[in-house]
Amino acid sequence: MKQVVLSKSPHITSNLGFGTSALIGSNSRAESLRILETAYDTGIRHYDTAPLYGSGDAEIVLGEFAQKYREQITITTKFGLRPMAATSPATQSLKSVLRKVMRFTPKLKEWLRRYSGKTITKSIYSKESLQASLDQSLQKLNTDYIDCFLLHDCGVSDATPEVLEFLETAVKAGKILTFGVGTSFAIIQELAQTQPNLLPVMQFANNLCLRNAELLLQSPQKSLLEQGSIMITHSPIGDCLKRLRDYWHRHPQQKQIWQNTLELDLEQNQIVVALLMSYAVASNPDGIVLFSSNCPHNIGQNIRNLWEPPFAPAQLAGFTAMTAEVTDRAS
């Protein structure tokens, strides 16, 4: 697997990373650890987490996994969003029961997803809050340092000189190796003009329907990459796959034209996912692309399809052009 430098840090890691936002869900602790092991076995060495993920439990599970591989992997965690406090024994027991029930009740799973948005707390951006969050993440992850520490879903007004001073001091103390922001692409564009020193790492959504990485590479902000910053992109599949499926459902004749022109069976989910993943990696050649899956088989399949794609380069180029035309027209 291709290796990249994690921005202005001494560490080299894989250009594919594994996201843990949905790691826990209906999975048991043992199943979650097995998923992380599967990602490692495929060559992935970068793992992305946050205090918010898994209702606060994703960092703990990743920390348990990291005990075996700490010197071989890099870890991103974040500050800014967290679940409402729910640490009593009764609450923890309820979470365990709900995860088991979710396996057999899809409607409950969907309801909990919608409800979870109402249980998120935004942190106060102060040195005290940053320090408390960093200390808690270090403890949960069972590590002495964080490779990459991001401001999670921050706004422009959150990026104060006080915040930058804290992050730079934490780097000097060896508690974090590099830092940046993980937020919307629009806010990153604005911060690139007003607070570029906050952007050694820029983490944002990118896929064939958004093409944010292309926009950054074509903008004056490309200079940040030339100075050593790195793009970490996420969401390479989900929303774009749904948009394409919806489009083909509404325009079956167009879908047939795509299939005839590309000579690809777009009914095969594996092929469409492979096309989307290949675009995500190609559009961020010197950065990290995050993906996630709760299915060990799918993790391995996604990696295999990147190295041995079930299509030719010309077919990927044609699919990219057709998708761009549709999404540009929709916007």
Image (cartoon, rainbow, N blue to C red):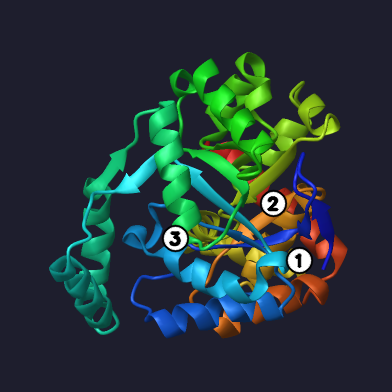
Q: Which residue is mark 3?
A: 140
- Say which of marks 3 and 2 sits in front: 3
- Seen in the image, is 313 located left or right of residue 208? right
Q: Where, by quadrant of the figure, is residue 39 drawn?
A: bottom right
- Which amino acid type corresponds to the residue marked 2 in the rendered image? Met
Q: Are the two marked residues, 1 and 2, in contact with CB atoms closer than 8 angstroms?
A: yes
Question: Compared with residue 277, is residue 122 higher up or lower down, i.e. above or below?
Answer: above
Q: Please tell me in which quadrant of the rendered image residue 315 appears.
A: bottom right
What's the residue type where badge 1 is placed?
Answer: Leu
Residue at the image position 52 percent from the left and 64 percent from the top: 252
Mark sitting on residue 322: 2
Report whether 206 appears left or right of 14.
Answer: left
Classed neighbour count for the residue bearing mark 2: other residues with Cα under 10 Å, few (<14), some (14–19), many (≥20) = few
182 up-or-down from 139: above or below: above
Quadrant of the image for the N terminus?
Answer: bottom right
Please tell me whether mark 3 sits on a helix, a strand or a loop. Answer: helix
- Could you classify mark 1 by the number of other residues whose Cα lies within 10 Å: few (under 14), some (14-19), or many (20 or more)? some
Q: Residue at x 17, y 72 (%)?
A: 94
Q: Is residue 84 above or below residue 221?
A: below
